[in-house]
């Protein structure tokens, strides 16, 4: 029945809801993504700090994360953190795999041991050898 037009055009309330949700999504989605990235980076920092602390003082046997953490993550810390937390590694690989060049994905699949280093290199946008939160 098209006599009165489609339902969302007959009542402008539906059109307003669609427009409002589109505008909100357009503006809020990048904020949401940035917050999720910040949370993932903090998790990575905590895992890296915990791993570094375990390496430095492996005689201390506690399961608490250190309260202090560096504002950067090195390649060694990145690799150790991903090794220590396979769930984090899986989430990170899934998040960046679609954005990587096909050659890098092929290299990761051919030699999985290189995957953390290749992802680290891709994430390190300023080529400083460390990851910062803005990257």
Image (spheres, rainbow, N blue to C red):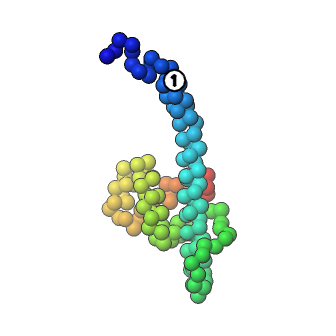
When asked about the image quadrant of residue 94, the answer is: bottom left
When asked about the image quadrant of residue 56, the answer is: bottom right
Q: Where's residue 113, x and y in %?
A: 39, 67
Describe residue 133's horizontal placement relative to residue 95 as left or right. Answer: right
Can residue 73 be seen by looking at this rendering? no
Can residue 43 be seen by looking at this rendering? yes
Describe residue 83's horizontal placement relative to residue 28 as left or right. Answer: left
Q: Which residue is mark 1?
A: 13
The residue sitting at 61% across, 52% down in the picture is 134
Q: Residues within 10 Å of mark 1 (few under 14, many from 20)?
A: few
User: Which quarter of the rendering shows the N terminus?
Assistant: top left
Frontmost residue, 13 versus 115? 13
The residue sitting at 37% across, 54% down in the picture is 105
Q: Secondary structure at mark 1?
A: helix
Eyeballing the image, is 29 above or below 40? Answer: above
Describe residue 35's horizontal placement relative to residue 106 as left or right. Answer: right
Q: Where's residue 131, x and y in %?
A: 58, 59
The residue sitting at 37% across, 52% down in the picture is 103
Eyeballing the image, is 29 above or below 119? Answer: above
Frontmost residue, 13 versus 135? 13
Q: Where's residue 76, x and y in %?
A: 53, 70
Q: Where's residue 6, x and y in %?
A: 39, 19
Name, please, the residue furthest toward the bottom. 59
Name, please, the residue furthest toward the top. 3
């Amino acid at each position: 029945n098209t006599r009165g037009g489609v339902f969302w055009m007959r009542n402008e309330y539906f059109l307003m809801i669609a427009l409002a949700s589109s505008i909100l999504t357009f503006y809020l989605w990048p904020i949401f993504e940035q917050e999720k990235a910040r949370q993932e980076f903090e998790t990575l920092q905590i895992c890296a700090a915990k791993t570094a602390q375990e390496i430095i003082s492996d005689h201390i046997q506690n399961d608490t994360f250190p309260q202090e953490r560096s504002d950067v993550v090195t390649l060694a810390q990145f690799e150790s953190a991903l090794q220590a937390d396979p769930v984090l590694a899986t989430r990170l690989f899934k998040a960046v795999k679609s954005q990587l060049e096909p050659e890098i994905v092929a290299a990761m699949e051919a030699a999985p041991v290189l995957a953390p280093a290749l992802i680290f290199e891709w994430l390190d946008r300023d080529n400083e050898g460390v990851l910062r939160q803005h990257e």
